[in-house]
């Protein structure tokens, strides 16, 4: 069996890369829905349908657990799939399968608290707010998932989301670094104006953005802590497998890369991030 990693495009490779480092013996199948990328501007029902189709394909490829390495899919589709689709899917397949997201681990990393924790509401005035900037796709920003879930757990953290239209698409297309740097600087400047000062911390709330994490680091004030989703996801998945030994993750170190889009080599930007040539099979 194997671990499946799903994203609308190549951004999920940032999560996949860290998972491979954490589980080098495991078998992995990566699926990029490049025929429909990006997901950030699509209607919610369409995102649910596309995400379900991707999970079905990965289950058919022998994956027991699928990680949605996409904030938009995790925020819009995951709960629906877990509640209304997965129970019937398990019966049909006749084996334990699950779909996990990356938002829960990210919020746990941002708050320092387990997902099950909810803060007791008190009327005490918060002396000092920790201002957290979340850079994301328009769909993730519109869902307000980070604002809602972090507020449930930490009243001393103020979350500001900055939608970054077209940035994931630029990364997917391998845009020149100068153009990417200008776009990132514009989004950092925009959220700084809205807050009235620079954020204390930041979340790169789209896995594509990890590919240009250095550009965000350069645009933010020096030393601004950045919460990286790939590391948070790898840590959370290791704990999940310890609690759920019924899931087989393989032991042959297999690596397959599938795409609904154009098979073959990817952009030089993606290959530079990956550390070598990367070729996709047609899904």
Image: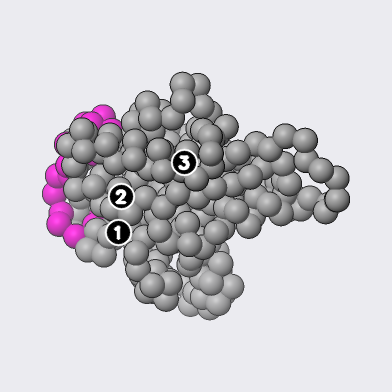
Instruction: Pick out the residue farthest to the top.
Output: 222
The N terminus lies in which quarter of the figure?
A: bottom left
Instruction: Name the residue located 27 percent from the left edge and 60 percent from the top edge.
Output: 37
Q: Which mark is residue 1?
A: none
Instruction: Name the residue located 42 percent from the left edge and 76 percent from the top edge.
Output: 45
Residue 182 versus residue 1 in the image, above or below: above
Of badges 2 and 3, the one in the foreground is 3
Instruction: Name the residue located 63 percent from the left edge and 45 percent from the top edge.
Output: 158
Mark closer to the chain start, 3 or 1? 1
Of badges 3 and 1, the one in the foreground is 3
Q: Residue 168 carries which label?
A: 2
Observer-nearest of 144 and 118 = 144
Please state if 103 lies on the left or on the right of 162 as rendered. Answer: right
CA separation in Å, label 3 and label 1 = 27 Å
Residue 163 versus residue 221 in the image, above or below: below
Mark closer to the chain start, 1 or 2? 1
Q: Is mark 3 on a helix, strand or loop?
A: helix
Disc 3 marks which residue? 193
Look at the image and give the residue range highlighted in magenta. Answer: 257-276
Circles 1 and 2 in contact, beta carbons < 8 Å: yes
Q: Is mark 1 on a helix, strand or loop?
A: loop
Image quarter for residue 232?
Answer: top right
Instruction: Count how many numbered circles sit on residues in the image.
Output: 3
Q: Is residue 23 among the parts visible in the rendering?
A: no
Circles 3 and 1 in contact, beta carbons < 8 Å: no
Q: Residue 38 carries which label?
A: 1
Give the x, y percent position of residue 186.
34, 40
CA separation in Å, label 2 and label 3 = 22 Å
Observer-nearest of 12 and 184 = 184
Give the x, y percent position of residue 106.
56, 44
Mark closer to the chain start, 2 or 3? 2
């Amino acid at each position: 069996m194997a671990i499946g990693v799903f994203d609308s495009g190549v951004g999920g490779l940032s999560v996949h890369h860290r998972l491979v480092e954490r589980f080098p013996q495991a078998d992995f199948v990566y699926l990029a829905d490049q025929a429909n990328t990006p997901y950030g501007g699509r209607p919610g029902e369409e995102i649910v349908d596309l995400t379900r189709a991707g999970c079905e394909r990965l289950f058919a490829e022998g994956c027991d657990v699928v990680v949605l390495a996409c904030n938009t899919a995790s925020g819009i589709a995951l709960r629906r799939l877990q509640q209304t689709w997965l129970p019937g899917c398990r019966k049909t397949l006749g084996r334990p399968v699950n779909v996990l997201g990356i938002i829960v681990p990210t919020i746990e990393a941002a708050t320092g608290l387990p997902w099950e924790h909810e803060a007791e509401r008190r009327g005490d005035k918060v002396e000092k707010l920790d201002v957290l900037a979340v850079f994301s796709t328009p769909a993730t920003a519109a869902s307000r998932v980070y604002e809602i879930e972090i507020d449930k757990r930490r009243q001393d953290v103020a979350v500001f989301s900055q939608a970054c239209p077209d940035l994931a698409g630029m990364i997917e297309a391998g845009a020149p670094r100068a153009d990417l740097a200008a776009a990132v600087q514009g989004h950092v400047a925009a959220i700084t104006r809205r807050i009235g000062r620079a954020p204390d911390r930041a979340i790169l709330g789209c896995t594509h953005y990890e590919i240009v994490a250095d550009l965000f680091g350069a645009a933010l004030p020096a030393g601004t802590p950045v919460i990286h989703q790939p590391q948070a996801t790898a840590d959370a998945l290791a704990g999940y497998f310890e609690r759920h030994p019924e899931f087989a993750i393989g032991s042959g170190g297999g690596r397959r890369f599938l795409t609904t889009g154009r098979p073959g080599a990817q952009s030089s930007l993606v290959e530079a991030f990956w550390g070598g040539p990367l070729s996709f099979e047609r899904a």
